[in-house]
């Protein structure tokens, strides 16, 4: 099989995954807000929001049942999407996005090694590359915590066709400064 006949491998669109996760977060917040207004009046809207979005449904249920990052991998994707969405309004989010991203793999804690690696060296042509040995120690154990907020929208804003966009903006504007304050002050 030549290069022309070979199929193109499927690559996941990271941006599409993040947009979908942020949409799930916004829809879950909208569904919770609409439930607070009137279940009988907005029941069909809430059911429609949640039936087409498995992650939004999971987030809405998380408020009544014990759901953690360790037992719900979908929440990890939503958390990463939120950090990426916060980058325009939060210096902390930009720093977190550039840092080492570790998978929790159903663990409640992650031990992070401290690696000491010898620096690379410039060598002349034909010179042998020296083998240098680094060291590693377990210096930190990460345990997840959450940053929580409540945002207020009027019933008119939640009934609007722009409700998801307004909720997303309200969440980002509430969380961004709080994250910066926690990280830098």
Image (spheres, rainbow, N blue to C red):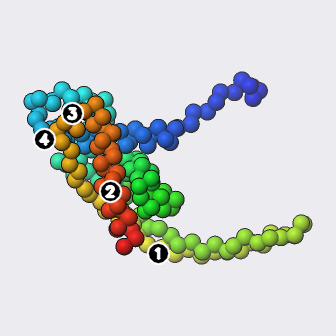
Task: Classify mark 1: residues with Cα within 10 Å, few (<14), some (14-19) or many (20+).
Answer: few
> For mark 1, what is the residue?
139
Distance from disc 2 to disc 3, alpha carbons, whole Å, reads 23 Å
CB atoms of marks 4 and 2 within 8 Å: no
Taking the view exactly as shown, the residue that stands out farthest to the top is: 5
Q: Where does the image place residue 106, in percent across and percent down from the top left?
A: 37, 54
Which of pointers 4 and 2 lies earlier in the amino acid sequence?
4
Distance from disc 1 to disc 2, alpha carbons, whole Å, reads 29 Å
Query: Is 56 placed left or right of 95 in the picture?
Result: left
In the picture, residue 30 is in which quadrant? Answer: top left
Query: Relative to the observer, which residue lies in front, 22 or 91?
Result: 91
> For mark 4, what is the residue?
36
Q: Residue at x 56, y 36 (%)?
A: 11
Is residue 23 visible to the viewer in this orientation of the structure?
yes
The tag on residue 175 is: 2
Task: Classify mark 2: residues with Cα within 10 Å, few (<14), some (14-19) or many (20+).
Answer: many
Q: Residue at x 22, y 38 (%)?
A: 157
Q: Where does the image place residue 86, in percent across and percent down from the top left?
A: 41, 53
Between label 4 and label 3, give the one nearer the viewer: 3
Which of pointers 4 and 3 lies earlier in the amino acid sequence?
4
Query: Is 132 placed left or right of 28 in the picture?
Result: right
Is residue 56 visible to the viewer in this orientation of the structure?
no
Task: Classify mark 3: residues with Cα within 10 Å, few (<14), some (14-19) or many (20+).
Answer: some
Between label 1 and label 2, give the one nearer the viewer: 2
> For mark 3, what is the residue?
159
């Amino acid at each position: 099989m030549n290069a022309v006949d070979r199929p193109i491998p499927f690559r996941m669109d990271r941006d599409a995954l993040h947009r979908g996760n942020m949409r799930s977060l916004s829809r879950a917040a909208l569904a919770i807000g609409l439930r607070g207004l009137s279940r009988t009046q907005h029941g069909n809207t809430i059911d429609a929001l949640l039936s087409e979005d498995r992650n939004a449904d999971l987030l809405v249920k998380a408020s009544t049942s014990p759901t953690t990052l360790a037992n719900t991998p979908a929440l990890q994707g939503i958390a990463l999407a939120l950090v990426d969405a916060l980058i325009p309004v939060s210096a902390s989010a930009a720093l977190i996005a550039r840092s080492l991203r570790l998978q929790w793999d159903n663990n409640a804690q992650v031990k992070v090694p401290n690696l000491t690696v010898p620096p690379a060296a410039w060598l002349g042509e034909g010179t042998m590359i020296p083998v240098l040995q680094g060291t590693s120690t377990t210096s930190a154990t990460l345990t997840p915590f959450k940053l929580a907020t409540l945002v207020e929208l009027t019933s008119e804003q939640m009934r609007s066709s722009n409700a998801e966009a307004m909720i997303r903006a309200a969440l980002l504007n509430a969380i961004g400064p709080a994250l910066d304050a926690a990280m830098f002050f």
